[in-house]
Amino acid sequence: MIRIDNVSKDFDDITAVDRVSVDINEKNVFGLLGTNGAGKSTLLRMVAGIIRPDAGTVTVDDMKVYDNPKAKRNLYFVSDTPYFFVNGTPLDMLSYVKNQYPMFNTEKYERYLKAFNLAPDRKINTYSKGMKRQLALLLGICAGTKYLLCDESFDGLDPVMRQGIKTIFAREMDERGLTPVIASHNLRELEDICDHVGLLHRGGVLLSKDLDDMKLNIQRVQCVFESEEDEKKLLAQIDMVKDDVTGSLHVYTIRGKKEETEKAFACVNTVFCEVLPLSLEEIFISETEVAGYDIKKLIMG
Amino acid sequence: MTSRSSSWVNLTENNKRRIWQWFVAILLLVILNSVLLLLMLMSMDEDVYVINYGTRAMDMMRSDAARYCSEMIGTGAFRTVVTTFLAVLLAFGGYSYINDKVKLDFYESMPMKRGDRFSTIWLSGVLIYTGTYIVGTLICFFIMTVTGYGDVYTMEEALYAFVKLLLYFLAVYHLYIFAMMLTGTAIGGLCAYLVMSLFELATRGLIGLYKISFFKYDYILDDFYIPVISPYGLFMKMTRDSYVSGGRSPLEYALYLLLLVFVLLAASYIVYMKRPVERAGKTLVFKGMATFLKLLMATEVVAYASLLTLYVLNRTRQLKRGDICAIILVCFITSLIICSIIEAVFELDIKAVVNKKAHWFICAGFALAVFFGFKIDFFNIDEYVPAADKVASVVFAPQGYEDSYGYFVPEYGNVRDYEYWLNNMNISDVDSVRSLAALSMRKYDEALKVVGSEDEIYRYGDGEEFSSAVVMYRMKNGRLITRQIYIPVKDSEAVALLDTIMTSDEFVNGFFAEMNPDIDKCIPEKKDIYSGGNVFTDGIHTIKLDVNEIKEFISCYRSDMETYSYRDRLNMWPVGYLDYEIAYNDPDGGRVRASYGSTRSIVIYPDMNRCMSFLKDRGYEPGNFDLSKEAVRISVKNYHYDKQEEYAKEQGLDYLPEDMAEDFIKSRLYDATSDSEKFNEIASCIVPNERGHWRWDGGLSADYDYDVYVIFDPSSPLGTQFRNGACYCFLKDMVPGVVEKELSL
C-alpha cells in the first residue's frame, strides 16, 4: 500500500500540496483528479521519490520512498513529459530500464512493442507524441513493479491506443496485482478505468472514495408526483442532494442505496417514476457540490 | 549500498550516454595531441639546424624535440588548456541533467541512491579523461620512439605531468560540479564557475590596485596576484620549480591541490544531496545564497568603479572635496546598475531590477568603506613595522645597488631578484633593519610634507637623497611582509645602520650573486656561445681574460668582499668592471644542452686588494695611465642644469626647450698643445664614463652638469681603438677650477 500521510510541499511562496493524506490500496486503479496546478504531479513526484516532502511522509509498503532504492523498485513513474535518451531507441531504453529494474520483462516488452507497432530499433525522436507516450507506458508496465505512477500519461493517446493500454492494465492487475495510479485533469479519461478516485484541489484533497461506493450510494430518479403531499412525504424519507424541477417533473439526486431509494418511492404515489443511470461525472458533480465546489469549474472546464 | 556488479552496470550505462564526450576527449587528447607532436617533430629540418648551429646542430635538434615532447605530453599549454576544457565539459555533460526537469523526473525516479548516481557520473567523467589521456600519451611515446626522440627523462616527465594534470583536472572538474550544484541552469552554472574561478584573482587585483594607489611603502610581489584557493593558482605554483616557490616544493603545492580537490568534492557531494530537485531551472538553488553572492559581487565591481573614478580624476593620495563627491556618486550609480542586473539575472526577470533597493545603498556603502579604509590606511598597514620578536629573519635589498646585472642560479638560470633574495638572504639583525625602516619612513614622510608629492621628492632639502630598498620580514608565523622603503642615504644615522646591515655576511652572501661559488660551474670552458666577453674594463682600457683567469678573478672578488665596507665605498669610484660569460643547461630538464647564456658584470673598487693585485699582475694600474700622452683634445660642456631648471620654473615650464637651453650651455675645447697646462689639469681629474653616473648609496658620483669628451691621437693605441674619442666625466666636487671658471655663465 502507498500511504501518503499529511504531506505538504511548498514551492517558494506557493503551497503545491497542503497536508494531503491518502491511502492507495493494492490491486486498485487509483485516479488522481484535479485541475492544472491542483498538486497532482507534485504529489505523484513525491510518491515516486523524486522530490522530498516538506512535511509528512510517503511510504510504499511501509518503506519511506525518498532516496530509497528498495522502495523505488516497487514503483515506476511515467512522467507527463517522458524522457528518452538523445538518439535513443526502444532497445536503448530497455537496456537502461532493465538494469534499474531487475524484474523487467523483456519478452513482454518486445511483444507489446510489436503489438503497438513501435519499431524497437527506430530512434525515439522520430516517434509521434502519442507513440512516445505508449512507449513510456510500456516501459512502465514491463518494469515489473507493483505500482505504476502515470502522470497525465493518457494525454495524446488515441481512443484505440488508450483502450489497448487499459486492457493491458487490466491484464497486469489480474496477472500480478499491478496497482496503477493515474493522475489526470480529465474525469472522463478515468471514468472507465478507476476503482478509487482522489480529487485534489488547491493542494488539498477534496474527496477520496471508491467509485463503486460512490455509484452505489448515489441515485438519480425522475418522477411526477400525484400531489404535493406525496412530495413532502418522500422528502422526509430520502437524503436529497439535488432536485431539478421542470414543470411537474422532478429529477432527484439522492444519497443512498438503490433498494432504499426504490423503497422510499414505493411509499408515495407517483404518476411516473424511473431510476436513471448516473455517470461518474454526475456523481462527482453531486459529491463536490455537497462539499461546496462547482466541479464543472474544477475538472471539466 | 550498491553491489559491485550493479555499480559496473551503472557505470557502463552512464558511459553509453556520454559517447559524445568520449569523442571530444579522444579527438583532443589522442588524435590532435599525437598529430601535433608528429607535425612538430617532422617539421624539424636537420639541414636548417646545421646551417644555424653548426657542430651543435644535433644537440639543438634533440633539445628542441625534447621541448616539443614536453609541451605535448607534459604540463605544457596544450595539455593544460585541453585538461581545463575537458574538466568543464565532462562536469557539465555528466551533471547537466540536474537542471532539466524532464531528465530529473526520469533519473530521480529510478531505484538508485542519489549518492550512487553522483559517484557513477563522477567516475565516468574521470574515466573518460584518464582513459584518453593514457592512450594519447602512449601514442605520443610511440611517435617519439619511432622518430628517435624518446628518452627516459621525457617518459619520467610524462608520468609526473600525468599526476599533476590529473590533480588539476579533478580540481577544475569538482569546481565546475560545485558551481552546477549551486545553480539551476546551464548559464547559471557557467557564471558561477567563472565567478568562483575569477573572484579571488579579481579581489587580489583590487587590493593590489588600492595599495598601489594609496600606499607608499607596501611592496607587492608578483606572487600576491596568484590565487591561493584556486585550481589554477595552485597548479601554476605546483608546476614551477621550487626555487621560484620560495623553497616550497611542488609536492607541497600538490598536497594543497589535493586538499582542494577533496574539499570541492565533499562540498559538491553535500550540495548535490541537499539540492532540492524542484529548484531546477532557477538561477540559484539555495535561496539564502542570493543576497550574499549579490553583495559580494556587486561590492567588488563598485570598488573597481571607485578606483577607476580615481584614475579618471587623475588623483592618487590627495583628494579634494569634489573628487570625494564624484567617487560617492559613481559608487552609488554603479551599485544601482550592478545590483539591478544581478537581481534580474537571479530572478530571470527584467522587472526584478527594481527589487531590493536597500542593496544599492549597502553595496555602495561597503565599497566606499573599502575605498576610504585604504585611503586613510585604517589598519595602519602601509607603515607597519613588525615587532622584533615576531620576525624570524629579514631580507634587505637595496634596489640597484652595485648594479648586479640580475641574479643567476646554476640549476635554474636567470631568476627574479626577489626570488634570489628570498632563497639566499636571512638577516638575523632584525633590529637594525626595523630601525632603518622606521627612520626611513619618518624621514620620507617629513620630506613629503615639505615637497607635497613623491614626484617632487628630489627637491627636498639640500643634498638629501632617497634610495629605495625592499625589506621582507619573514614572520615566525610563516607570513611574509614586504615593504619598499626610501632610505635617506646621506643621513648619518641611516648610513650607520646601512653599514651594520650591509656588511653582515648574511647580506653580502645573499645580495651579491657572485658570492655563490656554484656560479663557477656555469662559466663555459669552450667559447662556443659568445666570444670575447670575458674581460676586465674601465671603459677605456680592457684586459682580456681566459676562463681560468675569470675564475681566479672571481675568487679574488669573493675574498675581498669578506672585508667589504659600505661606509668606505661611499667615497670611492669604481676602478672598472669584470665582464664574464655564463652558460647553462635548460633549467626544466636534465638534458645536456648549452643553448642559454648571458654576460654578467661585477664592479671592482680600489679597496679590493686581491682584485687590484690580480689586475696589477696583468699590467693594469689606474695610476699608470697618462692621458696626455694619447689624447690631443678634450671637449668640456657645462649644461648648468640647476640654472636651466630655475629659469624654466620662472617661465612656468617643466623644462626648457632645446633652443632656450642652448643659452645655458657653455663649452670649450682644450688642446693638448696650445692649452697644455689646462689640458693636463683636466686630464688628471677625469675618469672614464662608460657605465653611467647614478649611485644608489649617494656616494662619490659624476658631476651631472658636465660632459667630457676626449679626442685621442689617431696614431696612439687608444686612438686606434676608439677612432675619434671616448666619454669621460668629472667626479662631483672635483671639477678643476679653471673649467668652473671658464664655463660659468
Image: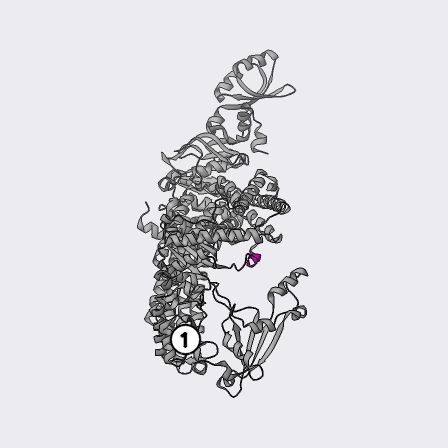
Residue under label 1: B581
Q: How is the image coloured?
A: one colour
Kind of residue indicated by mark 1: Glu
Chain that bears disc 1 = B
Residue B146 can be seen, yes or no: no
Work out which quarter of the rendered image holds the N terminus of chain B and state it: top left
Foreground residue among A124 and B251? B251
Q: Residue B240 placed where, x, y %? A: 40, 62
Q: Secondary structure at mark 1?
A: strand
Work out which quarter of the rendered image holds the C terminus of chain B and state it: bottom right
Foreground residue among B477 and B146? B477
Q: Residue A189 placed where, x, y %? A: 52, 37
Q: Residue B667 placed where, x, y %? A: 61, 75
**In the picture provided, is B619 more to the left or to the right than A131?**
left
Foreground residue among A2 and A14? A14
Residue B70: quadrant of the picture:
bottom left
Foreground residue among A212 and B618? B618
In magenta, the rendered stretch is B455-463
Q: Residue B668 placed where, x, y %? A: 61, 77
Relative to B650, say whether B680 is above or below: below
